[in-house]
Amino acid sequence: MKIGIIGYGSMGRMLLEKFLDGKCVSSEELLLANRTIEKIVHLKDRCTVCESNQELTAEADMVFLCVRPVDMKDILLEIKDYIKEDALLVSLNGSIMFEQIERICKGKIAKAIPSVTAEVNQSQTLVCYNERVTEADKECLIGLLSCMGTVIELPEQEMGMGSELVSCMPGFIAAIFQELCASAKKHTSLSESQIARMVLQTMVGTGTLMLEKEYSFEDVIARVATKGGITEEGTKVIQEQFPVVADGVFEKTLEKRRQTTEKARESFEG
Ligand SMILES: NC(=O)c1ccc[n+]([C@@H]2O[C@H](COP(=O)([O-])OP(=O)(O)OC[C@H]3O[C@@H](n4cnc5c(N)ncnc54)[C@H](OP(=O)(O)O)[C@@H]3O)[C@@H](O)[C@H]2O)c1
């Protein structure tokens, strides 16, 4: 089965590395195309470097579209007559809806949204499919994406919130803990790096504890924040003051997501 990747930016590069390193795809089965071909010619030993998107599409059984939304429409128009009858198109973009892609390409389409944690094989890659995609196609796509973590299927309308929870969340978590660490630094002679390491290890340990023991957030708080104790003072501040921040985060990101989806829709219809 031949796997094609169009676009060798941040996402295309990651997929190529993960597919090859995870031995999910052999070099012979992997095809790559990029607008600036000079950026990929050095990869000739690792995959087939295609001269054009059309050359790649004519060969591939699955085509990953790793390009920005602004480039997507032109690429679809360019490749639509070259897509193999049974091939699966996989868009990595969450803002472009199936309905828009289907106006140009009528076949099987999926969306796959990995997160930055794929770099350490801990992605929770979100996927959704149009109704032409078969169970066999899904199995094949999930098999490939599993080389960088787990795969979660969602309905298309939940991909936005899903992306907030797994794709944006590393950024949110980093921003929250950055603030906590900066505040801790004001009260200690420990170095910034030591504070960060202690907090990060605690974060990983807390996550593992919760997942392995099936603890809820309330369970962890109850275990640590004993009545009248020190932790309770801190958790009270967070519980009283943080909800405003949390609501603000989702209000802003979901509004931005709505605008981005609208912009993508306009660019497709324009
Ligand atoms: N970055 C993330 O964390 C992330 C996470 C989930 C989903 N996504 C989605 O993944 C998609 C790709 O994002 P990215 O961060 O990888 O973007 P990127 O780093 O900007 O890479 C885009 C690539 O597309 C290539 N390209 C543009 N037009 C092309 C064309 N006509 N034919 C062939 N290649 C073309 C560009 O080639 P040049 O070398 O010529 O510029 C570039 O290599 C986006 O839709 C994004 O929303 C990104």
Image (cartoon, rainbow, N blue to C red):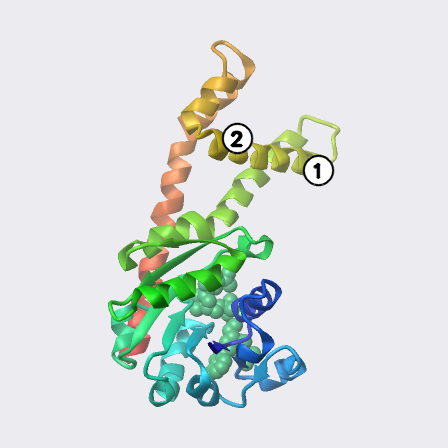
Question: Marks 2 and 1: which is nearer the front?
Answer: 2
Q: Determine whether the residue tagged by mark 2 lies in a helix, strand or loop.
A: helix
Q: Is mark 1 within 8 Å of ligand 1?
A: no
Mark 2 neighbour class, 10 Å CA radius: few under 14, some 14 to 19, many 20 or more: some
Considering every residue shown, the one lying at the far top of the view is 228
Check disc 1 and report the residue beneath it.
192
Residue 260: % across, % down: 35, 64
Residue 98 figure quarter:
bottom left
Give the number of the disc on residue 19: none
Check disc 2 and report the residue beneath it.
209
Residue 182 visible somewhere in the drawing: no
Residue 211: % across, % down: 47, 35
Query: Which of 245/113 is in front?
Result: 113
Q: Is residue 56 left or right of residue 188?
A: left
Q: Is residue 186 left or right of residue 121?
A: right
Residue 66: % across, % down: 47, 72
